[in-house]
Amino acid sequence: MLNKNSLLWLFMVLLIPVKTFSQFQNQASEINIFLDKWHDAAAIADSVAYFDAIAENGIYIGTDKSEV
């Protein structure tokens, strides 16, 4: 028979992956939304939205060697 401490430990062990997976899902959703907006900006040539999405210290490297 399981005592209270064992039940508590078991409960916590079972909940940790659920919380971690939930956090992963939230982060994945936020990343997908960001990338969708960024790709939309590129598709309609909205350079302001596109380049504003890049981190302040980010470096844009285009597809042409002259764009570096």
Image (cartoon, helix red, strand yellow):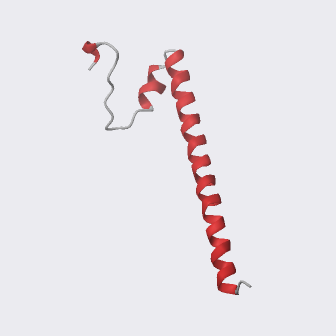
Q: Position of residue 36 (x, y in %)?
A: 57, 28
Q: How many marks?
A: 0
In which quadrant is the C terminus drawn?
top left
Residue at the image point whose x is 53% and y is 16% from the top: 43
40 or 18: nearer the viewer: 18
16 or 39: nearer the viewer: 16
Residue at the image point whose x is 59% and y is 35% from the top: 33
User: In the current view of this chain or complex, which residue is farthest to the right?
Assistant: 1
User: Is residue 33 shown above or below 18?
Assistant: above
Location of residue 32 by image quarter: top right
Q: Position of residue 40 (x, y in %)?
A: 56, 22
Residue at the image point whose x is 70% and y is 86% from the top: 4
Q: Position of residue 60 (x, y in %)?
A: 33, 26
2 or 8: nearer the viewer: 2
User: Is residue 1 shown above or below 56?
Assistant: below
61 or 46: nearer the viewer: 61
User: Is residue 30 shown above or below 35?
Assistant: below
Q: Position of residue 58 (x, y in %)?
A: 33, 34
In which quadrant is the N terminus drawn?
bottom right
Residue at the image point whose x is 58% and y is 57% from the top: 20
